[in-house]
Amino acid sequence: MKWFALLLVAFALTACDYREVTREIGYKGKARINPWLAAERFCAQYHGKVRSLASWEEPGNGDAVWFVPAQLLANASYTKRLSQWAADGGHLIVLVDHASDTNDWYQRFTENKLEPPLLQMLDQVGIELKDSPSTASTVEFDGETYEVAATSQSSVRQGKEKPGVIASVETGEGRITVITDARIFRNRWIGDKQHAELLDALILATGMEGGIGFLRGAGLSLWDLLGMHLWPVLTGLGVLTLLWLWKNFTRFGPIEAATTTSPLRGYEHHLEALGDFQWRHDRAAALLAPLRSQIVDRGQRLSIRAGRRDDDFFQFLADLAGIPRDRAFRAITMNAPPDSTLLTRITSDLQRLLQVLH
C-alpha cells in the first residue's frame, strides 16, 4: 500500500500544470527613486548644468529653468521669491498632478491640494488653475503643436482660453508655465509621443542661459519603501513579537513563589487575631486559665526538684524564661487585661514559660 500511494503521488505530480506571468516592476537604481532622472540627463546633454534637489531650495542668479512640484508652493514666502525670480528672467515650471517621488510602476499617486498661495501667484500673472479633470492628446506651446498623452484631475488656462493641461505666460523678463500632468516628463513616459520635444521647447523658451533645477520635494522615505515592499514580512515579525511578549512578560504583576507563606497565616498573626477576638468578647480568663494551670503545676514541681521551694516563685519562673519578674507576675496573676495588645503580650509570655517548663 505504501508503494502504491507513492506511485499515485508521482502520477499526480506529472499531471500538474503551471502558467508563467511576466510583471513589470519598474526601473532599478537611481531611476527607481528619482522619477526625473531621464529628463535631467536629457537636459544635461543638450542644455548644460542640471541640479537635482530632494528638498526646497531657492533658485540662484545663475539658474535659468526651475521645475517645482505644486505641493511645495504652500506658503507665500516660497511663491513670492519664485515669482520675483521668474520676473527677473527665469522660467518657472509648476508641475501639479503626479509630481511626487512615487515609483512610476507603483500606482499610488497622491493628487495635490491647490493651496491659496499658489493660486494667488498664478492669478497675478493671468493663469487660472482649478480642480477639474482635463485630458489632452496635443498641446500648443510657443506657436508649436506637440503630441502628448496627458490626463489629470486639474485644469489650467490663460485668460479666456479653453482649460487644458498646460498654460504659459510671460512675466517681466521671464516666464511661468503650469503643467497639470507631470507624467509626461517622468522616466516611464518621457519617451512617448513628443514629450521630450516639449521638454526641449520649455528649456529654450527663456532667453536666459544658466542652470536647470529639478525640485523633487522630498527624498524617498525609508518607511514608504518598507510599506511598499516589506509589509508582509513586517506584519509577520510584529505578530511574532506580540506573541513573544505575551508569553514572556508577567501578567497582573510578578508571579508569587509557590513556597511563600502568607503573613496572615503565621503563628503570631493567628495568636494576635485570636487574642483580639477573645478580649473583645470578654473571654480572656477562659483563654489564659489552661496555660496558667499548666505553668503553675510544672513550675512548682520543678522548683522542688531544684531545691528552690521556698524562693520567690515568680522570680524562679522569670529566671527560667529570661524575662523580668513583673512580666512573669503579670502573666500568672492578671485576669482582665485592659486591651488586646496587653492580652497578646501576656499570652506570648505564658507560651514562653510553658516552653521552658516542658
Image (cartoon, rainbow, N blue to C red):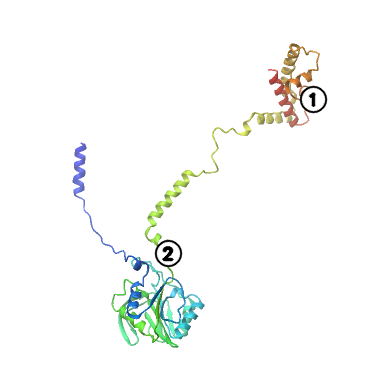
Determine which residue is flagged by label 1: 326
Q: Is residue 133 above or below residue 311?
A: below
Q: Is residue 305 above or below residue 6?
A: above
Residue 163: in sight, yes or no?
no
Give the CA distance from mark 2 to mark 1. 86 Å
Report whether 294 appears left or right of 101: right
Q: Amino acid at mark 1?
A: Asp
Residue 259 pos. (x, y %): 55, 32
Report whether 312 appears left or right of 145: right
Determine which residue is flagged by label 2: 221
Report whether 21 appears left or right of 92: left
The mark tally for this picture is 2
Q: Quadrant of residue 300?
A: top right
Residue 43 pos. (x, y %): 34, 78
Q: Residue at x 70, y 23 (%)?
A: 352
Residue 339 pos. (x, y %): 76, 31
Q: Which residue is nearer to you in this view: 357 or 296?
A: 357
Query: SS for tag 1?
Result: helix
Residue 145 pos. (x, y %): 31, 84
Query: SS for tag 2?
Result: loop
Q: Earlier in the sequence, mark 2 or mark 1?
A: 2
Q: Quadrant of residue 287?
A: top right
Dot 1, crowdedness within 10 Å: few (<14), some or many (≥20)? Answer: few
Q: Which residue is nearer to you in this view: 356 or 331?
A: 356
Image quadrant for the C terminus?
top right
Q: Amino acid at mark 2?
A: Ser
Residue 221: in sight, yes or no?
yes
Image quadrant for the N terminus?
top left
Q: Residue at x 47, y 85 (%)?
A: 124
